[in-house]
């Protein structure tokens, strides 16, 4: 067994993310100043101090949670698990009148029910308080003082504190959503993976409730994605330092730019378009994004180069009459009118995307909710591809 050092010094943290965004998150952490960066499946471990933990929650665009590992051990059965959870000095982090919530994820033949592991963890912690101070802490699943994360792989148990509270994809700006919303973290990841540079125009041609365009605007103007949230989990911890948080927050907000990148969000349907406008207003980027009710197939470029981000219907939650024909129409439009542009399309419909008639320069696996998707990047050449290559060689 091992315990982690006092969090007033540098300590290990783990940022979780969506499958496929690990390297993107690692690059974000590197730019933010993290050390000892190590990607792992659906996450990245790193080290930093308490102020960096605050900054990571505030500024990371592709993180879901910032976890602080505190305790690890091996347990061969539920009795050993209970005993070792109970022997930890939980009073270092909470009082008997505080509340707790426990989330468990398992990959084990010994422990197979996450709710049961959560229950045993809660019993162990509460029984320790009863023995020591004769008071049993309460559970609060929505807004606890301490949110505890238990991960079990085979017989290895890792216990962490969840410093984020609500998942970091809950930015706080999205007041309206449509029937098939894209999570903010995925949208931010798509913007970063696309390689878009804010001096070039960006078109979100099927914007729905506007998440892609908003995340692009936040990125372009260096707006911290967490600055719209009212709270984070660490704000209820006993060692929370409001003055340090204010310093981190103020420093990050002072780096916001007031550039006016050319971002165009359009949708054929007026209802999601109005949602997008309301969300952008809350995010304070409604002056940066140009909204238009229009079919993607009616859009025309006004610059020779730019970026198109598309999240077309997959024929999953939004049904279509002929998905294959729709995707072919997308490809035809891109070839006809957007030579010189770069296009990134995300879809879970692997059959339909074949009908787009284009060869991707890059293909990445991501998840939109439970749906496994491909993010495909296309370089649209002006004239023929052969002529474009010859021009570069010359």
Image (cartoon, rainbow, N blue to C red):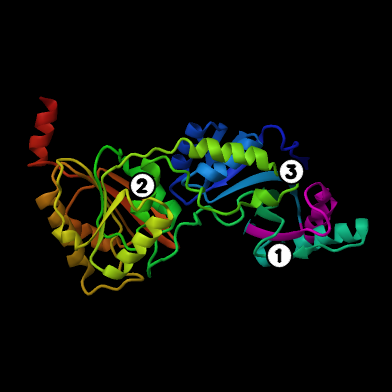
> Disc 3 on helix, strand or loop?
loop
Give 328 or 137, whichever is nearer the viewer: 137
- Residue 300 falls left or right of residue 281: left
Q: Quadrant of the N terminus?
A: top right
Badge 1 density bin: few <14, some 14–19, many ≥20, Cα 10 Å: some
- Which residue in the structure is indicated by mark 2? 217
Q: Given this view, does label 3 or label 1 mark the residue nearer the observer? A: 3
Query: Which residue is found at the position 81% from the left and 52% from the top?
Result: 84
Q: Which mark is residue 76?
A: none
- Which residue in the structure is indicated by mark 1? 140
Query: Which residue is found at the position 42% from the left and 40% from the top?
Result: 222
Asked whether 73 falls inside the magenta stretch, the response is no
Query: Which residue is found at the position 78% from the left and 56% from the top?
Result: 81
Q: Which residues are magenta?
A: 77-105
- Residue 207 falls left or right of residue 298: right
- Which residue in the structure is indicated by mark 3? 239
- Count of picture labels: 3
- First in residue order: circle 3 vs circle 1: 1
Badge 2 density bin: few <14, some 14–19, many ≥20, Cα 10 Å: many
Q: Quadrant of the C terminus?
A: top left
């Amino acid at each position: 067994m091992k315990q982690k050092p006092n969090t007033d010094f540098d300590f290990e943290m783990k940022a979780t993310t969506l499958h496929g965004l690990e390297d993107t998150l690692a690059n974000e952490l590197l730019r933010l100043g993290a050390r000892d960066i190590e990607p792992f499946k659906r996450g990245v471990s790193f080290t930093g101090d308490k102020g960096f933990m605050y900054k990571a929650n505030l500024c990371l665009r592709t993180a879901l949670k910032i976890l602080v590992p505190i305790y690890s051990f091996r347990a061969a059965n539920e009795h050993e698990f209970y005993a070792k959870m109970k022997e930890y000095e939980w009073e270092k982090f909470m009082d008997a009148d505080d509340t707790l919530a426990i989330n468990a994820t398992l990959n084990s033949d010994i422990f197979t029910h996450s709710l049961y592991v959560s229950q045993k963890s809660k019993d162990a912690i509460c029984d320790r308080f009863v023995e020591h101070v004769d008071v049993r802490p309460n559970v609060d699943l929505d807004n606890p003082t301490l949110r505890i994360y238990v991960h079990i792989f085979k017989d290895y148990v890792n216990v962490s504190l969840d410093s984020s509270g609500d998942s970091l994809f809950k930015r706080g700006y999205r007041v309206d959503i449509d029937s098939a919303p894209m999570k903010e973290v995925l949208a931010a990841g798509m913007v970063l993976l696309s390689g878009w540079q804010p001096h070039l125009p960006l078109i979100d041609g099927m914007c729905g409730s506007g998440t892609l365009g908003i995340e692009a605007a936040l990125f372009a103007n260096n707006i911290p994605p967490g600055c719209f949230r009212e709270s984070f989990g660490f704000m209820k911890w006993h060692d929370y330092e409001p003055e340090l948080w204010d310093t981190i927050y103020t420093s990050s907000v002072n780096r916001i730019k007031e550039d006016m990148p050319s971002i165009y969000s359009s949708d054929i349907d007026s209802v999601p378009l109005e949602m997008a406008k309301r969300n952008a207003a809350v995010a304070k980027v409604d002056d940066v994004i140009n909204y238009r009710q229009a079919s993607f197939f009616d859009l025309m470029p006004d610059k020779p180069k730019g970026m198109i981000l598309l999240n077309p219907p997959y024929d999953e939650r939004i049904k279509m009459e002929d998905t294959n024909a729709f995707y072919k129409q997308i490809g035809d439009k891109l070839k006809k009118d957007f030579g010189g542009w770069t296009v990134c399309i995300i879809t879970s419909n692997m059959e339909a995307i074949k009908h787009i008639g284009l060869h991707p320069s890059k293909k990445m696996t991501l998840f939109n909710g439970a749906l496994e998707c491909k993010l495909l990047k296309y370089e649209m050449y002006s004239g023929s591809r052969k002529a474009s290559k010859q021009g570069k060689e010359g």
